[in-house]
Amino acid sequence: MTTERTGLREQKKQATRVALREAALRLALRDGPENVRVDDIAEAAGVSPRTYNNYFSSREQAIVAAVTAEREARVAAALAAVPESAPLSEAVTRAILEQYTDPGDADALLLVTTSPVLRQAFLDASAAVEPPLAAAIGGRLGDAGAPVARV
């Protein structure tokens, strides 16, 4: 019974996180990132500003989270799907490009790349791809141990 409650609680937390990041991106695309307030994001997601602060520390972080959400796991999965016969550099490049060239993301990526503050938040968030990508590279090379070099 405890497991069910924990599962439901985690599902609710994930749904709140998704609602916040989607609201942040929607408002930023509509009004410009500099015109979006935390209170606006919280209201659009149907939560209090205090709840917002439990998930994100800034509006930039929430906006960027909408662009980077779950990409780290998808990049690792895409790398694992590239045939072993492909050179590692080609496989990594293909896996990353596959996750950042979806035409549906064009407006969001343009928003992030044209705003210096969002660009920095994006670079900070993109560092999260390193551990799963390093693990995927290690698996591809037959080395399941700790990576010897940073990705």
Image: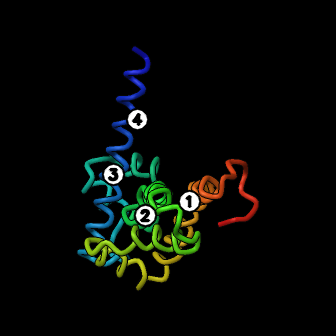
- The reply, left or right, for residue 96 in relation to residue 149 is left
Task: Name which of mark 1 and mark 2 comes first in the sequence.
Answer: 2
The disc label shown at residue 20, or none: none
- The image shows residue 65 at horizontal and vertical percentages of 42, 61
Kind of residue at disc 4: Glu
- The reply, left or right, for residue 145 in relation to residue 124 is right
Q: CA distance from mark 1 to mark 3?
A: 17 Å
Q: Mark 3: few, some, or many residues within 10 Å (few <14, many ≥20)?
A: some
x 33%, y 51%: residue = 18
Q: CA distance from mark 2 to mark 4?
A: 20 Å
Image quarter hosting the C terminus = bottom right
- The reply, left or right, for residue 125 in relation to residue 30 is right
What residue does disc 3 label?
Answer: 18
Task: Name which of mark 4 and mark 1 comes first in the sequence.
Answer: 4
Total label count?
A: 4
Task: Name which of mark 1 and mark 3 comes first in the sequence.
Answer: 3
- The reply, left or right, for residue 106 in relation to residue 71 is left
Image quarter hosting the N terminus = top left
Q: Secondary structure at mark 3?
A: helix
Kind of residue at disc 1: Ala
- The image shows residue 9 at horizontal and vertical percentages of 38, 31
Q: Are marks 1 and 3 in contact (CB under 8 Å)?
A: no
Q: CA distance from mark 2 to mark 3?
A: 12 Å
Kind of residue at disc 2: Thr
- The image shows residue 63 at horizontal and vertical percentages of 38, 66
Q: Secondary structure at mark 1?
A: helix
What residue does disc 2 label?
Answer: 68
Q: Are marks 1 and 2 in contact (CB under 8 Å)?
A: yes
What residue does disc 4 label?
Answer: 10
What residue does disc 1 label?
Answer: 128
Q: Secondary structure at mark 2?
A: helix
Q: Secondary structure at mark 4?
A: helix
